[in-house]
Amino acid sequence: MIYITSDWHFGHSKPFIYQPRGFSSVEEMNEEIIAKHNEIVKPEDDVYVLGDLMLGCNEVGLRCIKNLKGNIHVIRGNHDTNARMELYNNCYNIVEIAEGKFLNYKDYHFYLSHYPCLTDNCDEHSPLKRRMINLCGHKHTQNIFEDFDKGLIYHCEVDAHDCYPVSIEEIIKDIKEIII
C-alpha cells in the first residue's frame, strides 16, 4: 500500500502546532502521530512524507521517525534544512529523499510536493487519469480541498487527516467524489 502524509513537526514545541491538532503538549502529539501511523502502516508499505518531518530538537525528531513503520520517502519541506536532510540519511526506514517527485499509480499521475502547486493545464474536462494531481502539505489546513479552486490540489498534512497518513486509494476516492 502507498500512504501520503505531511507536516508531522515532530518535536515542534509551539502551541500553535499541537493545540489545533487537539493536543496539550508536543510529547502527546508525537506519541499520537506515531501510534496512528503504526496502526495502519505495515513494514512493507511505502509512505511519502511531503515535508516538515521535524522541527526543534533533532534528537527527539529522529527518535520519532525511527519508530515509524514503512519505507519512508521524504519530499523536502520548508523546515527540512540541509542539515536535517543529512540527518534523515541516518534513519534506517528512510529509503528516498527528494525535492519533489512524480508518482504514477494505476494510471493516475501525481506530483508530490510540500507546497501546493498548479499541475494541471486547465484540463478539467479531461478524464482524471489524464490529469496531473498535486499532493501537498504545508498549510496545516483541515480541508483536503482548500486549494481545489486553483487546480487539482489535494492536501495530505496530518492536520487534514486526524493525524493519520492517507492511502493513495482514499485520495483517488475523495477526488472522484468531488469532480464527478
Image (cartoon, rainbow, N blue to C red):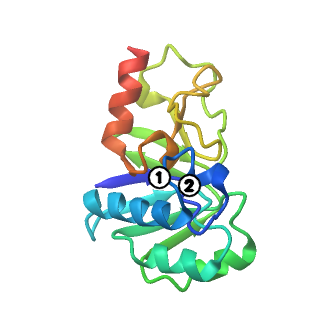
* Residue situated in front as seen by the camera: 43 or 25: 25
Which disc, if any, is residue 50? 2
Residue 170 position, x and y percent, is 33, 38
Which disc, if any, is residue 5? 1
Three-letter residue code for mark 1: Thr
Q: Residue at x 62, y 60 (%)?
A: 52
Q: Is residue 111 above or below residue 94?
A: above
Q: Residue at x 27, y 57 (%)?
A: 40
Residue 9 position, x and y percent, is 59, 61
Inter-mark Cα distance, 2 to 1:
6 Å
Q: Residue at x 61, y 49 (%)?
A: 113
The reply to whether the C-beta atoms of the residues labelled 2 and 1 are less than 8 Å apart is yes
| Residue 137 relative to residue 70: left or right | right
Q: Quadrant of residue 12?
A: bottom right
Which disc, if any, is residue 103? none
Three-letter residue code for mark 2: Leu
**Quadrant, the C terminus:** top left
